[in-house]
């Protein structure tokens, strides 16, 4: 018996599209998180320069 994903009878294109959408969503989340961290680091540097730390 060959094991695989449960597809509930969905067409292959729809299953693949769902996987791609999930991957894109995860990538978008990761990129936004990285951008937020970069903004915090930039803000920290600005405060250090202005505050003379």
Image (cartoon, rainbow, N blue to C red):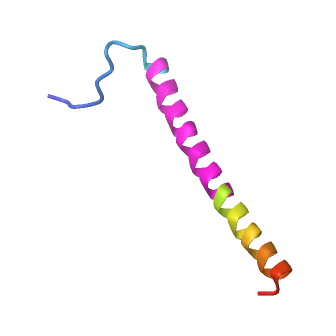
Residue 24 lies left or right of residue 6; in this view the side is: right
Q: Position of residue 13 (x, y in %)?
A: 49, 19
What residue is rendered at 82% in x and 86% in y? 52
Quadrant into which the N terminus falls: top left
Q: Nearer the viewer, residue 51 or 44?
A: 51
Q: Nearer the viewer, residue 36 or 18?
A: 36
Pick out the residue farthest to the bottom: 53
Residue 21 is inside the magenta segment: yes
Residue 25 is inside the magenta segment: yes
Whether residue 23 is situated above or below residue 48 in the rendered picture? above
What residue is rendered at 53% in x and 42% in y? 26
Whether residue 30 is situated above or below residue 3 in the rendered picture? below
Q: Position of residue 21 (x, y in %)?
A: 54, 31
Q: Quadrant of residue 40?
A: bottom right
Q: Nearer the viewer, residue 27 or 52?
A: 52
Bounds of the magenta segment: 14-35
Determine the main secondary structure of the stretch shown in magenta. Answer: helix
Quadrant into which the C terminus falls: bottom right
Pick out the residue farthest to the front: 51
Residue 17 lies left or right of residue 33; in this view the side is: left
Residue 2 lies left or right of residue 6; in this view the side is: left
Q: Quadrant of residue 51?
A: bottom right
What residue is rendered at 30% in x and 29% in y? 5
Q: Nearer the viewer, residue 29 or 20?
A: 29
Q: Position of residue 20 (x, y in %)?
A: 53, 33
Q: How many marks?
A: 0
Whether residue 52 is situated above or below residue 32 in the rendered picture? below
Residue 23 lies left or right of residue 50; in this view the side is: left
Pick out the residue farthest to the left: 1
What residue is rendered at 76% in x and 67% in y? 43
């Amino acid at each position: 018996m060959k094991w695989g994903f449960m597809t509930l009878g969905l067409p292959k294109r729809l299953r693949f599209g769902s996987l791609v959408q999930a991957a894109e969503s995860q990538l978008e989340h990761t990129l936004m998180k990285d951008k937020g961290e970069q903004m915090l680091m930039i803000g920290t540097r600005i405060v250090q320069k202005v505050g003379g730390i």
